Amino acid sequence: MRSRLASLALRASRWTAVGQVPRTGVLVGAPHTSNWDFVMMLLIMWRGGVTPRVLIKKELFRGPLGWLLHRLGGLPLDRDNPSAVVRELVREARSGEPFLLILAAEGTRTKGEYWKSGFWRIARSAKLPIALAFIDGPTRTAGFGPTISATPDVVADMDQVREFYRDKHGIHPERRTEPRLREEERASR
């Protein structure tokens, strides 16, 4: 039922979904430039028969919205203390059960200087693949691209990420943050 509803909603909105929905891994959703990104990814995941886990800032879990976010796979993230959540997610990912976590690597819907490195660190710690998902407003296309493995070479990993997102713009292209991690600067010193 959920799959049919999602397919109808995507068709009605005239967006095209591409690629295969991964079943396991850390899914990077980018560019993250609108609140609609979450809705779009959720529809595409449901269309593929998957209900993912999604890290969402804890402030949004107040009141009735919190109940809904939990039901949609949302996990509250305390951005002042993310390491506790990351440790718990790595433990859950290593349990052997199917595990798909969506992260908006930009961490915000506004233009920034760096992406958050949580997707890379979680994937590397839990030995999970990184699946690259996208939303491209100008082409009204959203979906999934390649899956990569996190290695000790963060620069090489991010070169692959940059290549994939090179022509992906988000719903509001002016808010797009280039795929770059602070860890890359430290690695090149």
Image: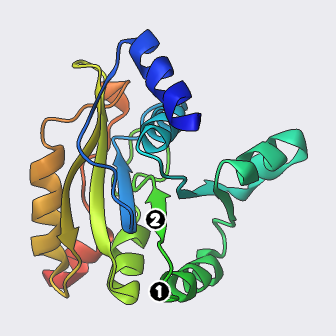
Q: Looking at the image, can residue 109 be seen?
A: no
The percent position of residue 122, horizontal first and vertical second, equals 42, 78
Q: Looking at the image, can residue 22 be seen?
A: yes
Q: Where 80 sits versus 6, above or below?
A: below
In which quadrant is the C terminus drawn?
bottom left
| Residue at horizontal 51 percent and vertical 79 percent from the top | 97
Q: Is residue 91 left or right of residue 66?
A: left
Q: How is the image coloured?
A: rainbow
The percent position of residue 22, horizontal first and vertical second, equals 33, 58
Q: Residues within 10 Å of mark 1 (few under 14, many from 20)?
A: few
Residue 96's tag is: 1
The kind of residue on which mark 2 rests is Leu
Q: Is residue 135 left or right of residue 101?
A: left
The kind of residue on which mark 1 rests is Gly
Q: Where 134 sits versus 55, above or below?
A: above
Q: Secondary structure at mark 2?
A: strand
94 or 55, nearer to the observer: 94
186 or 16, nearer to the observer: 16
Q: Secondary structure at mark 1?
A: loop
Mark nearer the viewer, 2 or 1:
1
Q: Where 124 sits versus 102, above or below?
A: below
Residue 147's tag is: none
* Circle 2 residue: 100
